[in-house]
Amino acid sequence: MVIYISEYDSPEDPQGILKQTLAMGSEFPGPAADVFLAWTLRLGLDSNVAEAARAVIRDYHLDTVEDHGGEHAKLVTLIREAAKGQTVTARRRGGARGRSRSQS
């Protein structure tokens, strides 16, 4: 097994995937969602994605990056959204499948 260690490796950016991608700027061909997914998976199950995203924004100065479109901007937007800590709460779906069945 080969383990790639980047000089940019940190707990908030394992293997420096975001740092290296963001350094490409507008040259980054994308897709942004793939890089974002790879980053979240590398964080690990015990990591808080929102906290890691806030650290990335702070460390890489993403709060001052202007949106010029393209995949680079999409990646910055995904990181900013993750920093907000928005989560989806599971709810019971309506309809017959969501109701408990009584035993006769």
Image (cartoon, rainbow, N blue to C red):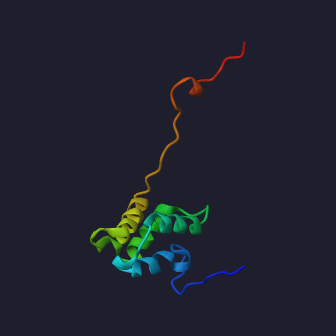
Q: Is residue 97 left or right of residue 62?
A: right
Q: Position of residue 76 (x, y in %)?
A: 37, 68
Q: Is residue 38 above or below residue 84?
A: below
Q: Residue furthest front?
A: 29
Q: Is residue 78 left or right of residue 96?
A: left
Q: What residue is at 66 percent from the left and 81 percent from the top?
A: 3
Quadrant in the picture for the C terminus: top right
Of the pair 101 and 35, the residue shown nearer to us: 35
Q: Residue furthest top?
A: 104
Q: Is residue 35 left or right of residue 41?
A: left
Q: Position of residue 39 (x, y in %)?
A: 52, 69
Quadrant in the picture for the N terminus: bottom right
Q: What residue is at 38 percent from the left and 74 percent from the top?
A: 58
Q: Is residue 45 left or right of residue 89?
A: right
Q: Is residue 8 above or below residue 67?
A: below
Q: What residue is at 51 percent from the left and 79 percent from the top?
A: 16
Q: Position of residue 51 (x, y in %)?
A: 47, 65
Q: Position of residue 96 (x, y in %)?
A: 57, 23
Q: What residue is at 51 percent from the left and 72 percent from the top?
A: 12
